[in-house]
Amino acid sequence: QVQLVESGGGLVQAGGSLKLSCAASGRTFSDYAMAWFRQTPEKEREFVAAISWGGDYIYYEESVKGRFTISRDNAKNTVYLQMKSLKPEDTAVYYCAASLSLGWFRGNRQDYEHWGQGTQVTVSS
């Protein structure tokens, strides 16, 4: 089992930046592939970015490529999401998730066993 706690959300103007953090505790962090998802009241939870156990493989949802960067520090048991050039449509609750599945790179929620409580990101126009 791993427990996940997100932080770093907030209110930012369009074009601004935020950096989300997700601190993990419990089972060995480096055992897990990690990802960020986001959800709004109008949409199902959607994939944003994922990173492999050692950070060698990274995948992004198309709309965030070039603007968001996922990274991890296994020594600190933390995964990050650096978000730049934010747009109002990036407004959502952002969740980090952990996966032991070999299918972690597909970006499917079903491949992620553990979830944080979410952190709100609001981008004003």
Image (cartoon, helix red, strand yellow):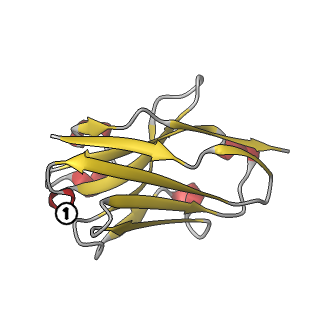
Q: Secondary structure at mark 1?
A: helix
Locate the C terminus and report the quarter of the image it occupies.
Answer: top right
In the rendered view, would you say 93 is above or below 8? above
| Residue 15, image x, y percentages | 79, 60
Does 40 sit left or right of 79 as displayed?
right
The x, y position of residue 13, in whole percent, is 81, 50
Q: Which residue is mark 1?
A: 30
Q: Nearer the viewer, residue 46 or 73?
A: 73
Q: Few, some or many C-alpha atoms within 10 Å of disc 1 (few <14, some 14-19, many ≥20)?
A: some
Q: Is residue 58 left or right of residue 18?
A: left
Counting from the top left corner in percent of width and height, residue 119 is at: 53, 38
Q: Looking at this view, is 44 or 13 the one in front?
A: 13
- Picture layout, residue 8 above or below residue 73: above
30 displayed left or right of 74: left
Residue at 48% x, 56% y: name it. 61
In this view, the residue farthest toward the bottom is: 56
Number of residue marks: 1
Residue 23 spot, x, y in % from top left: 37, 51
The amino acid at mark 1 is: Ser
**Res 116 → quadrant:** top left
Residue at coordinates 45% horizontally, 60% vertically from top-left? 80
Image quarter hosting the N terminus: top left
Farthest residue toward the top? 41
* Residue 2: quadrant of the picture: top left
